Image (tube, grey):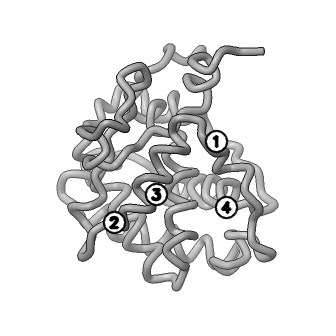
Amino acid sequence: MPSRETAHRRTRCRAVWPSLASTSNSCPLFPCFLLDLDQRRSRPIPPDFRQSRWSRCHGETSYMNQTEPKMSLFDRIGGTAGVNRFVGQFYTKVFADPTLRPYFEGVQLDKLQHMQSEFFSTALGGPSTYSGRTMQHAHQGLHIHPEQFQAFVGYLFETLQEHDLSEDERYAIIARINTSADDVFNTGIAPSE
């Protein structure tokens, strides 16, 4: 049976709200990636959500093993057509941001949106399977900084708000996407060709 530390390295949450970083609940053994969505929200994140986020990060509860609602997130967003519409709206915001636009120069936008539709469909529990490159390989050499990643996730959150998803559903989607944060920053092992 793997130790708690080993299991945490494999499955740790990659985001923690800033208010927890300085509390007695912070964990010096398992540093987590800091993602500050508070800056992009009009109201503060509820304290009970912050605490449950810390608990999930540190293995006190299993977030992904909680019972899903009867309708999957994929179905709630509108199935394949809804995901395609969502990805289109999301990338309209991303491309309009002057700090993010340079990362997409020379990229085939149709192919990118198709791959992202597959990625989000898979992340939301849909029937399609992501067939693109690994996140680490796709982002290798881009030198993405936390500020750009925060802006990217902020646009994701804004777009999710526009699709009438509940707050819990939006955070569930963000949590699923956050599992790729280390690969986007290329902090792991270099991908094999």
Quadrant (top left, top right, bottom left, bottom right) of the C terminus: top right
Which residue is rendered at x = 19% and y = 52% of the image? 99
Numbered tag placed on residue 132 in the rendering: 1
- For mark 2, what is the residue? 45
Q: Quadrant of residue 70?
A: bottom right
Q: First in sequence: mark 3 or mark 2?
A: 2
Quadrant (top left, top right, bottom left, bottom right) of the N terminus: top right
User: Of circles 4 and 1, which is in front?
Assistant: 4
Q: Nearer the viewer, residue 85 or 147?
A: 147
Q: CA distance from mark 1 to mark 2?
A: 34 Å
Q: First in sequence: mark 4 or mark 1?
A: 4
Identify whether 182 is placed above or below 116.
above
Q: CA distance from mark 1 to mark 3?
A: 14 Å
Q: Secondary structure at mark 4?
A: loop
Which residue is rendered at x = 60% and y = 72% of the image? 84
Taking the image as drawn, is residue 105 in sight? no
Look at label 4 and name its amino acid: Leu
Q: CA distance from mark 2 to mark 4?
A: 23 Å
- For mark 3, what is the residue? 109
Mark 1 is surrounded, within 10 Å at the Cα level, by few (under 14), some (14 to 19) or many (20 or more) other residues, namely some
**Residue 113: x and y, percent?**
53, 60
